[in-house]
Image (tube, helix red, strand yellow):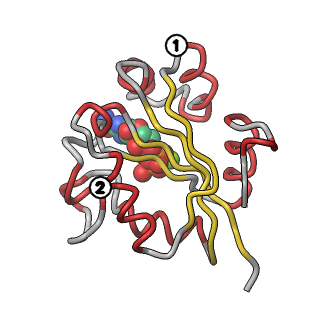
Amino acid sequence: MAKERTLSIIKPDATRRNLTGAINAKIEGAGLRIIAQKRVKWKKKDAETFYKVHKERPFYKDLVKFMTSGPIVIQVLEGEKAVAKYRDVMGATNPANANKGTIRKEFAESIEANSVHGSDSADNAKKEIKLCFKAAEIVG
Ligand code: RTP
Ligand code: MG
């Protein structure tokens, strides 16, 4: 099977509670490899660009505010079926609907402060990785 890559973001609610290591343990425990990682604080413009697909959604403004409220950890994950696999490890967007053992079930605070982002398709993963990382920052 060919390896696939996906973009992960550990969100401000999780970095604030010092959960980066616990989340990385779940990622690595699922057989995904962290091949790029950086801790940054987004400006308004960074969050608006990243989430521009959600521009018309009612939660967009709040989401931009939340994603700029503290440090985030942006990662590239690699593995077999990485996109779908990471969505499984993350759990449902709303932690109330997330399965046991998932990151969001264990750590998320709310539907917005839900601890992690993961690309939703291989195509979007490619776009998001390109937006967030230079090629030299990714070491597979
Ligand atoms: P993500 O993009 O972060 O991996 O999450 P997702 O696919 O599960 O959810 P999506 O529908 O793409 O929404 C993006 C993020 O917006 C926030 N959100 N808030 N208040 C609300 O109803 C609401 N709905 C979504 C969440 O932070 C969600 O992850
Ligand atoms: Mg999404």
Q: With 54 as the anchor, is 123 left or right in this view?
A: right
Q: In the drawing, what numbered circle is on residue 44? A: 1
Quarter of the image that includes the N terminus: bottom right
What is the three-letter code of the residue carrying label 2? Ala
Helix, strand or loop at disc 1? helix
Image height check: is 92 above or below 134? below
Q: In the drawing, what numbered circle is on residue 63? A: none
Mark 2 residue crowding within 10 angstroms, few (<14) / some (14–19) / many (20+): few
Q: x and y percent of residue 116 in the render?
A: 40, 47
Query: Which of marks 1 and 2 precedes in the sequence?
Result: 2
Query: Which residue sits at x=32%, y=44%?
Result: 115
| Residue 128 or residue 14, whichever sits in front | 14
Q: x and y percent of residue 93 in the render?
A: 35, 52
Mark nearest the camera among 2 and 1 is: 2
Q: With 92 as the anchor, is 138 left or right in this view?
A: right
CA gap, disc 2 and disc 1: 27 Å
What is the three-letter code of the residue carrying label 1? Lys
Image height check: is 109 above or below 25? above
Query: Which residue sits at x=48%, y=43%?
Result: 9
Mark 1 residue crowding within 10 angstroms, few (<14) / some (14–19) / many (20+): some
| Residue 14 or residue 122, whichever sits in front | 14
Residue 16 figure quarter = top left
* Residue at which label 2 appears: 22
Quarter of the image that includes the C terminus: bottom right
Residue 38 figure quarter = top right
Q: Residue furthest right?
A: 135
Q: x and y percent of residue 27 in the render?
A: 43, 64
